[in-house]
Amino acid sequence: METNRQKKIAGVLQRDIADIVQQALREAGVQGILVSVTKVSVTTDLSQAKVYLSVFPSKEGENVLKEIQAVKSQIKHQVAQRTKHQLRRTPELLFFIDDSLEYIASIERAVKGLDNPLENPEQLERRQKK
């Protein structure tokens, strides 16, 4: 159960990190990749923040995550500059890819019958012979 303070800090961090990441992508001249911060959850002691990123197109997710990991300290520094009047210490930022949208899309395809493994047996995993 998150406290109100955790929720408020998570909201501030989500907004600031989204701004910082978007600005970094613009400055790097990256075209055709959309990155959004879908969720931030903060630990009870406010020492860590898990940041979930949604990347479109999804095949670029791993590359974007690697790039963000490489500049994580700079992102934390910029967050600290923006939140210096609200937070005493900036939490350690942990970045993850949020694949929930892909998961929802795969469920929708399955429900609509678009990914029918009976019609397309290559979608099924191969059984191991014992």
Image: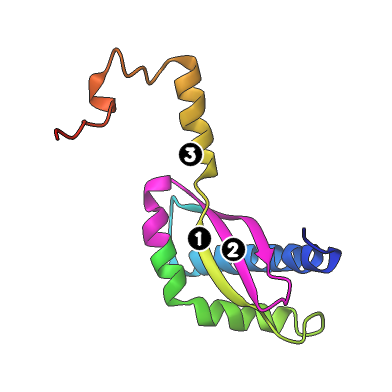
Report the span colored magenta: 35-64
Q: Amino acid at mark 1?
A: Phe
Q: Nearer the viewer, residue 92 or 79?
A: 92
In this view, 63 is above or below 45: above
Q: Position of residue 104 (x, y in %)?
A: 53, 34
Residue 102 to residue 110: above or below: below
Q: How far is mark 3 from mark 1, CA to CA?
A: 14 Å
Q: How many numbered dots are placed on residues in this image?
A: 3
At 77% from the left and 87% from the top, the residue drawn is 88
In this rendering, position of residue 40 left or right of residue 127: right
Q: Residue at x 45, y 22 (%)?
A: 110
- Which is more N-terminal, label 2 or label 1? 2
Task: Identify residue type, mark 3.
Answer: Glu
Disc 1 marks which residue? Answer: 96
Residue with the mark numbered 3: 102
Sequence-first disc among 3 and 1: 1
Q: Point out the image quarter for the C terminus.
A: top left
Residue drawn at point x = 64 percent, y = 65 percent: 19
